[in-house]
Each structure stands twice: as C-alpha cells, then as structure tokens.
C-alpha cells in the first residue's frame, strides 16, 4: 500500500528530525556552559 508506505517513511523522518534536533540542542547547551 503506497499510502501506508509514505506514512511510515514520514514518521521515520520525523523521528530522525527529532533526534537531530535533540542532539543539536544538547550540543548548544554544552557549548553554553
């Protein structure tokens, strides 16, 4: 099912983006100290 497939890819991308955002926030927090 193409629709389901794109939804799965989208949520996977969201997860990756969240992880990237978290790690960049962590790096900024470390740099601020």
Image (cartoon, rainbow, N blue to C red):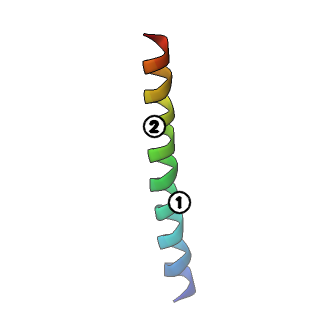
Q: Give the residue number, with chain letter if any, for mark 2.
A: 23
Vertical side of 27 occupied by 15: above or below:
below
Decide: is 33 above or below 21.
above
Q: Look at mark 1 in the image and give the residue it sits on.
A: 13
Please, is residue 20 above or below residue 15 in the view? above
Q: Nearer the viewer, residue 17 or 1?
A: 17
Looking at the image, how many numbered discs can be counted on the residues?
Answer: 2
Residue drawn 47% across the image and 72% down it: 8
Residue 19 appears at what percent x and percent y? 44, 46
Within-10-Å neighbours for mark 2: few <14, some 14–19, many 20+: few
Q: Local crowd at mark 1 within 10 Å, few (<14), some, or many (≥20)?
A: few
Instruction: Measuring from the top left, give residue 4's x and y in whole percent.
Output: 49, 80
Q: Residue lying at the far top in this picture: please name it.
A: 33
Residue name at image x 52 percent, y 49 percent: 17
For the C terminus, the quadrant is top left
Asked which secondary structure carries label 2, the reply is: helix
Q: Residue at x 47, y 62 (%)?
A: 11
Q: Quadrant of residue 3?
A: bottom right
Instruction: Give the farthest residue toward the bottom.
Output: 1
Q: Along the line of sight, which residue is nearer the eye, 5 or 30?
A: 30
N-terminal of the pair, mark 1 or mark 2, is 1
* Secondary structure found at label 1: helix
Select label 1 or label 2 by which is in front: 2
Residue at 43% x, 20% y is 30
Q: CA distance from mark 1 to mark 2?
A: 15 Å
């Amino acid at each position: 099912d193409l629709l389901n497939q794109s939804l799965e890819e989208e949520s996977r991308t969201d997860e990756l983006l969240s992880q990237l955002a978290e790690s960049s926030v962590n790096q900024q927090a470390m740099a601020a100290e």
